[in-house]
Amino acid sequence: GPKVLQIPSHQIIDMGQMVTLNCDPVSNHLYFYWYKQILGQQMEFLVNFYNGKVMEKSKLFKDQFSVERPDGSYFTLKIQPTALEDSAVYFCASSLGHSAETLYFGSGTRLTVL
Amino acid sequence: GEQVEQLPSILRVQEGSSASINCSYEDSASNYFPWYKQEPGENPKLIIDIRSNMERKQIQELIVLLDKKAKRFSLHITDTQPGDSAMYFCAASDYGNEKITFGAGTKLTIKP
């Protein structure tokens, strides 16, 4: 089936550093999402993105977070600067239409902030 | 925004018996209810979904029920197998929103 690829699968960085998480969504999908999951817990919505713009973001999407998809390349989540509480697994997802269409998730990037 | 409550958080059932997970939502505008299964270290995968124009949907051993009046929906796994052990997340969204709101998850363990 359709696959969403996330790079890297693991990332360890020092607090205060910048990190960029990369997502290669399903090729014909138009909507892109980031979710945050702390180990074994609920997946929490961060942000969604369509037509080059953020459509909606949650309270978890702090000012230090930003997303972009320059020229149809990777859909990225950048955190600058990182904080200890940013440690989590970040899942990228994409859908053909809006959120009422099937969301396809990537395998996640496990981010550890030391 | 939408809030989704999911219970139980932990569920253990004997192999071959049924498992039921219940969710409730707050926003009456929600009209799409997917269920995702997540195995350890893996990404969540859609296993079944139901839209508000239906009350019941079945795919093999998976049954979902939707009660729009009560704003509740549920997943029932009949004849459970060891491979059904995983985290299960319910979710809700509507065509007007651009996000899916997930429940807190249920860790299902099938005992042999």
Image (spheres, rainbow, N blue to C red):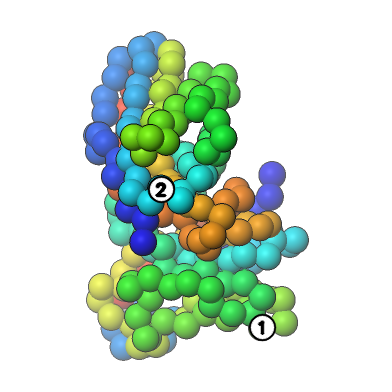
- Please, is residue B17 above or below residue B70 in the view? above
Q: Which residue is mark 1?
A: A70
Q: Residue at x 68, y 50 (%)?
A: A2
Q: Amino acid at mark 2?
A: Ser
The residue mark sitting in front, 2 or 1, is 2
Q: Is residue B84 visible?
A: no
Residue at 66% x, 58% y: name it.
A97
Nearer the observer, A98 or B41? A98
Amino acid bearing label 1 = Pro
Look at the numbered disc 2 and give the secondary structure of its residue: loop
The chain containing the residue under callout 2 comes to B
In the rendered image, the vertical position of residue B31 relative to residue A81, given as above or below: above
Return the x and y of residue A19 as percentages of the image width and height: 44, 81
At which x and y percent is residue A112? 33, 70
Question: Are the residues under badges 2 and 1 in a single subunit?
Answer: no
Quadrant position of the N terminus of chain A in the picture: top right
Task: Quadrant for residue A53, please give it.
Answer: bottom right
The residue wearing badge 2 is: B28
The image position of residue A18, as x and y in percent, is 41, 86
Quadrant in which the C terminus of chain A appears: bottom left
